[in-house]
Image: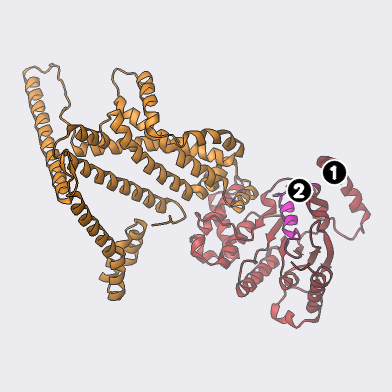
Chain colours: A red, B orange
Amino acid sequence: MSVIAMRKEHLHELPAETAGEAPSRPRAFLDLSGVSIDFPTRKGPFRALNNVSLKIAKGEFVSIIGHSGCGKSTVLNIVAGLYQATEGGAILNGREVNQPGPERAVVFQNHALLPWLTCYQNVELAVKTVFKGRKNKREMREWIEHNLKLVHMDHAMHKYPAEISGGMKQRVGIARALAMEPSVLLMDEPFGALDALTRAHLQDSVMEIQADLNNTVIMVTHDVDEAVLLSDKIVMMTNGPAATVGEVLEVDLARPRDRLALASDERYNHFRSQVLSFLYERQRRPVE
Amino acid sequence: MSNKLINYLETAGLNWAVPVVRLCRGEDAREQASELFTKVGLPLIAVLVFLLVWSVGASQVKTSLGVLPGPAAVWHQAVNLYDEHQAQREKADAFYQRQEERNAAKLERNPDAEIKWRDYTGKPTFFDQIGTSLLTVFTGFVLASLIAIPVGVACGLSPKLYGAISPLVQIFKPVSPLAWLPIVTMVVSAVYISDDPLFQKSFITSAVTVTLCSLWPTLINTAVAVASIDKDWINVGRVIRLNWRTQVFKIAIPAALPMIFTGLRLSLGVGWMVLIAAEMLAQNPGLGKFVWDEFQNGSSDSLGRIMVAVITIGIIGFLLDWLMVTLQSLLSHQKPAGH
């Protein structure tokens, strides 16, 4: 069956599916259904993801966790529109995802700031394009400054990326993504390249911003603590090839969450051990 | 303030002057002195050793034009060339003054008189030749860059286009300027016909030859640079949905700029080398022609004068490279290597 035909079928399926669900549950804001992807290799197509289905509600913070190489970033890239699924597809707010766009802004693992632009100009490049014709010059400037303030980078906004630390760069990367006013914020191991203290700092900032804006967020991570601390829902992926969703864990800890208080919290530790046992017992990586 | 000065010096590639500034500021004298020794002292010693070997070695070689000139003889010729230049300038000034006076007198007698302006037609001096060579190389280089950068960017963006023109590039890249020259000469004489030519034919011929040879490094470097831009940066542009133009001018070109500059540096270097050879053959006024004329002249001064030209060519080549490196560190986000 052709890819287009598959997609059409999913589109038709959508109303039926939502109708079948319990009426109290909100219709999924972002709906991944039956997503599979093949990468061409010399030995023929390599199936990285197989039949990944996932529903995410508006305002939900979802983490995708799994061992390295399990394709968790691939899922994110499909939602971002940077990769095209071989089968199945993603539907955001009733519209099919088939190309990248600012409504699905991405925070890249290595910040991906353009080194020849200052922090301000990096955000400006996005704002100028996304809000073209919708904001005037002054509003744009205020919006850029507002977003840099949100990530506590207003003091260094006219510095170049080479002049600030890794954590600060990632803050600017987050500001750039937030400035696009995305429906879904996609974060690809956003804190992976940072040291533990900086990471904790940024996690707190993200929680703060999340409490403010109530964004829908998908974050790819390999850090169990990070996943439990930040998420409403943790999607645990099986090992590749042909990786898929193994289990979904709802983390209904009250917000705002405080990392110190949670460290000795029983339920926090329960969630933590559930993720750990999934990763290290059921999905133990074969010795490499 | 002195920090700013140090920054300027480093941007300009004058690293050797930094310890001097630091010394003046009263920083640790011993450390700065040893810095100064490695940056200034050692190169100076090397130059002195070279001059010594040269002067001893040259005196051993007898040619039909006399003994090979040593450093002293070459210096003497350099001074000579400068004096000749000054003398020639004075003659030219006198000529123009006479002409002006004559014309003024003519107008006084008859206000409707037709006035003729003639350029001074004295022999171009060594320094005039340098000027001509620089003009020619820049013309050729700018022409080459104007072609190579856009084509390179297009090739970098489209692997298909790159694949299509790659064989042509591979074939024409290794061709020597001397092979191009006869063809360029014939084509220029056939195509460039005008009663009142803005440029001399020999100038066009040399410039076009420079262009043909200095196209390739810039073209290849630009294409490779654009093709190998960090994928994340491209993805940033895709997520923002930049239009094609912004994607090229705000992301692709700035990202490729360090490598484009490396290409330009190579091109200018190649162009300068090619130019000298082209001038010798095309008889375009310039340093190459100067060397050739001196060689044909065969006086006892000739070898010394040719060596002045050789050293001048070297120094200008070095200055051109320095100019490009400085431009690069001013314009692109990456500091060039070896600066």
Quarter that holds the N terminus of chain A: top right
- Residue receiving disc 1: A6
Image-quadrant location for residue B263: top left
Look at the image and tell me whether residue B6 can be seen: yes
Is A169 placed left or right of A100 in the picture?
left
Image location of residue A129, percent across then percent down: 59, 47
Chain letter for mark 2, please.
A
Tag of residue A43:
2
A158 displayed left or right of A228: left
Secondary element at image label 2: loop
Q: Quadrant of residue A22?
A: bottom right
The tag earlier along the polypeptide, 2 or 1, is: 1
B25 left or right of B181 in image: left
Magenta residues span A68-86
Mark sitting on residue A21: none
- Residue at image x 77%, y 81%? A265
Q: Gap in Å between the C-alphas at discs 2 and 1? A: 26 Å
Was residue B323 drawn as part of the magenta stretch in this picture? no
Question: Of B196 and A217, which appears nearest the observer?
Answer: B196
Q: Could you tell whether B185 is left or right of B118 in the image?
A: right
Identify which residue is drawn at 59% across, 49% down. A135
